[in-house]
Image (cartoon, rainbow, N blue to C red):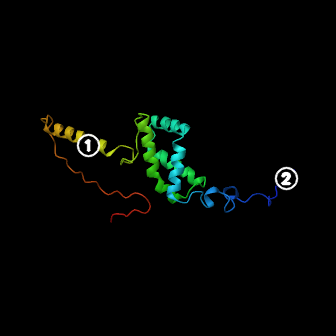
């Protein structure tokens, strides 16, 4: 016997798990710190803690750019409701300078992440260096005596072939 499933009308609405009541998220409430000065004091206190310094030094030794770390830290604080997005953007240079100071004090070679880079992560200086080497190779190749006779290229005229249902026919 075939049992027919009846629709479940008391189930959740599609997408209901992706919604929450207004004000239930930390970033939807007023921030704890509303000025840039308060946020700077907050970050200086948190980032100069011994455990935070050890974590920052470890991350810098792994080669993660300081700008990426600073963006992640401030975005996390925005999501926790500590400060607003605009205060976080204004505090990023202070966070970067503080982390650079921590890296200098620990004698760590770090990458700032503030340099202009191409889409694939190659810096502009490397691109200029590579292109100059390629130009030199091309010039050297052009200056070598030619051993092969160059034949002029002859363009071949192709006949238009009608193919398909909608193609034009030659009359």
The answer to which of 23 and 49 lies nearer the viewer is 49
Residue farthest to the bottom, as pictured: 171
**In-image side of 76 versus 150 (left or right):** right
**In-image side of 47 versus 143 (left or right):** right
The residue lying at 34 percent from left, 44 percent from top is 123
The residue lying at 37 percent from left, 58 percent from top is 162
What secondary structure is found at the residue carrying circle 2?
Answer: loop
How far across and how far down the image is residue 132, in percent?
23, 42
How far across and how far down the image is residue 106, in percent?
44, 34
Q: Establish if 2 lies above or below 57.
A: below
Pointer 1: residues within 10 angstroms few (<14), some, or many (20+)?
few
Mark number, residue 131: 1
**In-image side of 117 versus 139 (left or right):** right
The answer to which of 13 and 38 lies nearer the viewer is 38
How far across and how far down the image is residue 34, in percent?
55, 60
Kindly identify which residue carries mark 2.
Answer: 3
Contact flag, marks 2 and 1 (Cβ < 8 Å)? no
How far across and how far down the image is residue 44, in percent?
51, 47
């Amino acid at each position: 016997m075939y049992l027919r499933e009846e629709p479940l009308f008391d189930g959740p609405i599609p997408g209901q798990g992706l919604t929450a009541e207004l004000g239930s998220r930390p970033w939807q409430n007023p921030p704890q710190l509303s000025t840039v000065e308060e946020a700077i004091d907050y970050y200086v206190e948190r980032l100069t803690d011994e455990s935070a310094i050890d974590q920052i030094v470890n991350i810098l030794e792994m080669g993660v750019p300081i700008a990426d770390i600073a963006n992640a830290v401030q975005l996390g604080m925005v999501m926790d409701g500590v400060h607003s997005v605009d205060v976080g953007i204004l505090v990023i240079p202070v966070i970067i300078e503080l982390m650079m100071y921590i890296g200098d004090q620990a004698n760590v070679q770090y990458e700032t992440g503030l340099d202009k880079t191409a889409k694939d992560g190659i810096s502009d200086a490397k691109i200029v260096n590579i292109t100059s080497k390629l130009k030199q190779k091309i010039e050297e190749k052009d200056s070598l005596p030619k051993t092969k006779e160059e034949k002029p290229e002859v363009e071949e005229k192709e006949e238009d072939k009608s193919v398909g249902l909608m193609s034009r026919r030659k009359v």
